[in-house]
Amino acid sequence: MLQLFANASLTRNDWQDSHKLQLQVRRDIVDAQEKMKLKFDQKRCLGVKYEIGEVILMQKQSDPHLSSKLQRKYRDKPLQIMEVLPSDTYRLRSWKVLDTNHDDNVDQDNVADHNEEDQPV
């Protein structure tokens, strides 16, 4: 772009039409914007999209008063996606997790039993 302004210098006896110079500068700006957009898009991550019914684990917020090494990283119960809302937000429902140490005579209907509380994220 500096080359264009060098051509417009009044120290030389050449004169360039200002309209042609403006058009060239605008083209250079558009080209630079396209290059910047390509570089930005190469590094951009779109994130993870979830579908209704998927089961996920959500990270817990750490307690600032405790060492992060000793804290659990994820919530205790898995969550199910109930509704997809705008702006990458989801309505979740927690699952009941069965204790594996109890009898094998567990009614299979209770295995997939869910809490009825909806939790927006």
Image (cartoon, grey):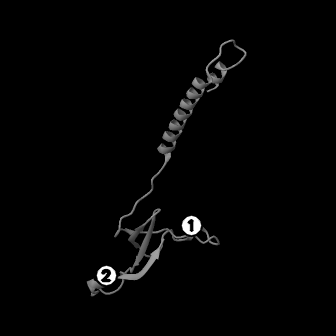
Where does label 1 land, which residue?
Answer: 69
Q: Which disc number belongs to residue 29?
A: none
When asked about the image quadrant of residue 62, the answer is bottom right
Specify the label residue 111 is tagged with. Answer: 2
* Label whose residue precedes the other's in the sequence (1 or 2): 1
35 or 5, nearer to the observer = 5
Q: Can you tell which of label 1 and label 2 is closer to the viewer?
A: 2
Residue 105 left/right relative to 84: left
Q: Nearer the viewer, residue 83 or 105?
A: 83
Q: Is residue 111 above or below residue 13?
A: below
Between the C-alphas of marks 1 and 2, the distance is 32 Å
Dot 1 falls on a residue whose secondary structure is helix
Looking at the image, which residue is at 42% across and 73% down?
92
Q: Amino acid at mark 1?
A: Lys
Q: Is residue 27 left or right of residue 57?
A: right
Crowd class of label 2 (few under 14; some 14 to 19; many from 20; radius 10 Å):
few
User: Badge 1, how many Cα within 10 Å: few under 14, some, many 20+?
Assistant: few
Hey, what amino acid is under mark 2?
Answer: Val
Left or right of 25: which side holds 111? left
The structure residue drawn at horizontal position 50% and vertical position 37%, both measured from the top left corner, is 34
**Which residue is depicted at the point 40% across and 60% down?**
49
Q: Is residue 3 above or below residue 32?
A: above
Vertical relation: 48 (above or below) 40: below
Residue 67 vs residue 48, the one in the foreground:
48
Image-based side of 47 in relation to 32, left or right = left
Q: Which quadrant holds the N terminus? A: top right
Q: Position of residue 52 (x, y in %)?
A: 35, 68
Secondary structure of the residue carrying numbered label 2: loop
Q: Could you tell me residue 116's position as x and y percent?
A: 39, 83
